[in-house]
Amino acid sequence: MLINYEKVTAHLQDIRTGKIKEGLILGVPEIDEYFRFKPSSFNIVLGHSNTGKTTIVLYLMLAYSIKHQIKWLVFSSENEAYSIIRKLIEFLEERPIQDVPQKQFEKHSKFIYTHFKIIDANKTYTYRELLDLCKVVKDAWNYQGLLIDPYNSLIKDPKLISSVGGHEYDYQVASEFRLFAKKKNITLFVNAHGVTEALRKVYPKGHENEGLPQPLNLAQVEGGGKWGNRADDVLCVHRLTGHPTEWMFTELSVLKVKETETGGRCTPYDAPLRLRMKLNGVGFEYIGRDILYYRQDTKEEIKF
């Protein structure tokens, strides 16, 4: 099948004349400069285990739901459904669930039910079985965003491995993820761990973070660099969990932005976005501003 040449040239014309539609913003300029929510995009979120990848991604997803009414489908095999919903409620209320009044609990639960659907993770899936399920849900409930967390929790497809070999398997998966995002016009986030060897790459002697793991790069994602090659955007989540004070900061690095015309760019190598965890772990702030509720146009926080 050949491309639609008129459609392609029309897109180029939009780029040439500055009419290209940019990705959705969070309303925090310093974050929006580097990252946007873009339809039909395949995004990798990589990071070491237990650094809070799922937590920060859920928080950003919720922010897009509040500000742009984005609906999400979530597959998270490492977290119970009640744990995910609890996190979202605590993010909305900004306090532990035990302190949430009944009226607010019901209000937040309704908002989450409207904007989030969670796939039962008490079943194993190959990536194709999961995508088939996501297609069914898409037809019944028109979500705009999908989270697969993490990729290595999906069981290998033995038929595909036997036909393409283990080396090409992950490339095939990444390609099909990318095509799914394009065909269904969704924003797909796939959380990925780093290779085991990456944990051995620590800050050198004399560094302020001496002995602690360094952030991952594109070549260190589990499954190989092919993931970075196929992805539109790549984010790295890093946290110094063993540091006495820095453990409360999540560093978000943007390692790749395929289409800068629609907004976003890579963060400087030595200057990631530093998001500070709120007390009791009920959200994040950036330079003292609440990411969920801050509005750039008024310089104030919106009420939910």
Image (cartoon, rainbow, N blue to C red):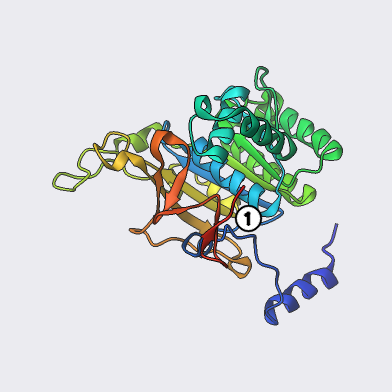
Residue 32, image x and y in percent?
A: 53, 62
Residue 135 appears left or right of 191: right
User: Which residue sits at x=70%, y=48%?
Assistant: 70
Residue at the outermost top position:
122
Reply above or below: 233 against 268.
Answer: above
Res 169 visible: no
User: Which residue sits at x=24%, y=44%?
Assistant: 203
User: Which residue sits at x=64%, y=54%?
Assistant: 67
Using the rendered view, name the quadrant where residue 77 is placed.
top right
Residue 60 appears left or right of 179: left
Residue where numbered disc 1 is placed? 37
Residue 99 appears left or right of 7: left
Reply above or below: 55 against 68.
Answer: above
Per the image, label 1 sits on a secondary structure element best described as loop
Reply above or below: 41 against 137.
Answer: below
Which quadrant is the N terminus positioned in? bottom right
Of 103 and 244, which appears nearest the observer? 103
Residue 215, image x and y in percent?
A: 36, 45
Residue 95, image x and y in percent?
A: 48, 34
Residue at the outermost left position:
206
Res 256 visible: yes
| Residue type at tag 1 | Phe
- Crowd tier of the residue under label 1, counting other residues whose Cα lies within 10 Å: few below 14, some 14–19, many 20 or above: many
Residue 124, image x and y in percent?
A: 66, 20
